[in-house]
């Protein structure tokens, strides 16, 4: 656990000299896959103790160290500078992996991705010629092409690929909104037949395309066993708006949304928190109203990570409304309980459809490593389960039955939704331009791994032409900065 730059260089050097390629880096420990902790790992560089956030006079720039968690970053930037990042909602996600993997959240329609604001990175890399660890400060204005290319790659593809990131710099950051308003509309599964479900999804696509950039929505298409499904919307105040104007505007938009969604299916008050991220989104008792709060209070309200439990995630981007085949498959799988578990065991499983677009779409697809710049919706398939196993036993008998049921359900669900493109949201097989790959910060080993020989497919879905086709591409950057492939995992960027 390095506490400063010189310790970081020394520890990376010592760990790699001693353990070679079996060294990993960890920050917030929120990785969805076993990229860090697995059977071959022999040393872990843990960034938790490098966790300062604030203003660095020397650069001068805002600085966020890799060991920070979202919540401390939000609080410090907001309370000391009235600034914010368009980062994720869950308070305990670590800056180390989150920022370099892209980073998005409820302000992203207004402010883009976190990497869109990034201006420089401090990173410890491994020099394979001299067998030594080196500290580099890389930015878009670095003197060498190689350093500028590395900075580009770290804006979306840095997770465990090129070295150990110590800190992120931002020359400027967006002003934090003053106020935020949150409302939830929920519907009983019992009143939704397949036609109403299709209408709901069709209208949701219109709703997110038309909404002001100050708004962000999370549609939680929960498994039928949850009893209800719902949509949470956060609307922040535009710069300069008074509380009264903001309130009036949101109340008007809320009334419109109620009327228009209500024409498809009557809403009913939310009876239980809906699962998924932001975890355990809750609403006040008698919640058929808008909650008007400060921006900090909104961050607190939507910040849950949920309890510790097992989970599996898959993602997809959509550039257009849901095609009918996908709607039918989604409806079918949300009503399917896999063999091996009771229906109630599925009550936290869902497909969450976040609004996207806005400022995210005003950046060119090759300006950062994140290429998905035309998407209007970002989908996250999620399933969770609790069992009584001890660490390391979750996939052993008798717990494996439950794990296999959940994993089978989510993998089959996804494969069927994208069946027409070969089972993944592969834009190369979609002449209609509807699907646009997946998100690297939501890694899913089923898409492809080095061990299975199909990692290129996964990396294509995450990075599209930025992976290996564009002139500036991730494979070339990897070859230049980590030719010995010291920093690797099941879905790391290959050297060739
Ligand atoms: C509860 C939960 C909520 C989430 N919500 C959001 C969200 O709202 N928006 C969003 O965009 N994403 C979200 N994510 C995904 C999140 O962005 C990724 O899991 C991210 O990679 C986590 O970073 P970490 O440092 O916490 O994880 P870690 O497990 O520590 O690391 C994740 C990956 O990054 C690498 N890495 C970590 N630190 C460094 C470093 N210092 N230098 C180089 N590589 C490093 C690791 O080796 C690993 O490959 C969420 C995840 C969870 C579990």
Image (cartoon, rainbow, N blue to C red):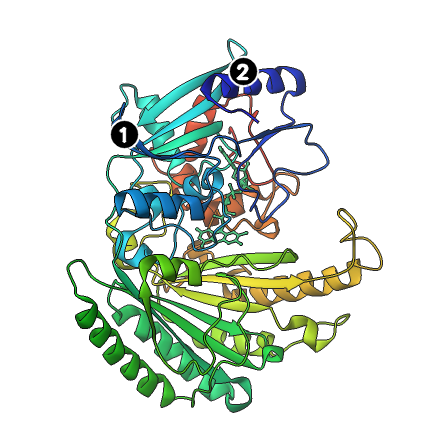
User: 489 above or below 264?
Assistant: above
Q: How far across and how far down the image is residue 424, in percent?
A: 52, 58
Q: Is residue 487 left or right of residue 119?
A: right
In this rendered view, identify the residue nearer to me: 157 or 383: 383
Q: Viewer-proximal residue, 238 or 294? A: 294
Instruction: Give the tally of numbered discs.
Output: 2
- Tell me the SS state at disc 1: loop
Disc number placed over residue 156 in the picture, else none: none
**Location of residue 126 in the rendering, given as x and y in whole percent from the top left corner:** 51, 19
Left or right: 395 in relation to 377: right
Q: Mark 2, residues whose alpha carbon is within 10 Å: few (<14), some, or many (≥20)? A: some
Displayed quadrant of residue 73: top left
Q: What residue is pinned by disc 2? A: 10
Q: Give residue 249's position: percent from left, percent from top.
A: 21, 74
Question: Picture coordinates of residue 233 (x, y %)?
Answer: 36, 70
Secondary structure at numbered mark 2? helix
Which residue appears at 76% of the width and 53% of the height? 394
In which quadrant will I find the N terminus? top right
Q: Quadrant of residue 72?
A: top left
Q: Is 214 displayed left or right of 352 in the figure? A: left
First in sequence, mark 2 or 1: give its number. 2
* Numbered circle sitting on residue 140: 1
| Residue lying furthest left | 240
Q: Is residue 220 visible?
A: yes
For image coordinates 26% across by 19% down, the residue present is 143
């Amino acid at each position: 656990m390095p506490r400063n730059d010189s310790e970081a260089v020394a520890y990376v050097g010592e760990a790699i000299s001693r353990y070679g390629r079996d060294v990993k880096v960890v920050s917030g420990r929120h990785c969805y896959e076993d990229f860090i902790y697995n059977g071959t790992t022999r040393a872990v560089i843990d960034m938790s103790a490098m966790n300062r956030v604030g203003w660095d006079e020397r650069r001068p720039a805002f600085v966020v160290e890799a060991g920070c968690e979202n919540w401390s970053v939000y609080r410090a930037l907001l309370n000391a500078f009235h600034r914010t990042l368009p980062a994720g909602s869950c308070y305990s996600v670590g800056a180390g992996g989150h920022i370099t993997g892209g980073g998005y959240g409820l302000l992203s329609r207004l402010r883009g991705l976190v990497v869109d604001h990034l201006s420089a990175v401090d990173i410890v890399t491994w020099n394979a010629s001299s067998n030594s660890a080196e500290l580099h400060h890389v930015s878009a204005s670095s003197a060498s092409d190689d350093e500028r290319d590395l900075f580009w790659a770290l804006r979306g593809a840095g997770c465990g690929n090129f070295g150990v990131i110590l800190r992120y710099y931002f020359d400027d950051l967006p002003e934090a909104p003053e106020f935020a308003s949150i409302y939830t509309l929920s519907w009983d599964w019992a009143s939704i037949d397949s036609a109403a479900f299709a209408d709901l999804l069709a209208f949701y696509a219109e709703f997110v395309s038309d909404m002001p950039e100050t708004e962000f929505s999370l549609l939680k298409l929960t498994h039928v066993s949850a009893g209800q499904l719902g949509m949470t919307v956060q609307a922040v105040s535009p710069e300069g708006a008074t509380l009264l104007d903001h309130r009036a505007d949101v109340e008007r938009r809320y009334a419109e949304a109620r009327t228009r969604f209500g024409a498809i299916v009557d809403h009913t008050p939310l009876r239980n928190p809906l699962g998924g991220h932001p975890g355990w989104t809750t609403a006040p008792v008698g919640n058929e109203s808008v909650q008007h709060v400060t921006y900090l209070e909104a961050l607190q309200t939507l910040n849950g990570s949920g309890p510790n439990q097992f989970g599996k995630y898959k993602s997809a981007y959509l550039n257009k409304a849901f095609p009918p085949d996908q709607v039918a498959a989604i409806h079918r799988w949300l009503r399917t309980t896999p063999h091996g578990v009771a229906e109630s065991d599925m009550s936290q499983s869902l497909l969450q459809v976040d609004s996207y677009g806005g400022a995210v779409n005003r950046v060119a697809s090759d300006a950062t490593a994140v290429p998905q710049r035309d998407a209007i919706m970002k989908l996250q398939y999620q399933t969770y389960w609790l069992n009584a196993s001890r660490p390391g036993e979750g996939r052993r008998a008798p717990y494996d039955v439950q794990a296999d049921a959940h994993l089978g359900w989510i993998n089959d669900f996804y494969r069927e939704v994208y069946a027409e493109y070969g089972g993944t949201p592969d834009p190369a097989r979609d002449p209609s331009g509807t699907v646009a790959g997946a998100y690297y910060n939501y890694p899913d080993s089923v898409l492809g791994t080095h061990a299975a020989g199909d990692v290129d497919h996964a990396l294509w879905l995450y990075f599209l032409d930025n992976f290996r086709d564009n002139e500036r591409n991730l494979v070339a950057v990897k070859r230049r900065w980590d030719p010995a492939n010291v920093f690797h995992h099941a879905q790391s960027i290959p050297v060739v």
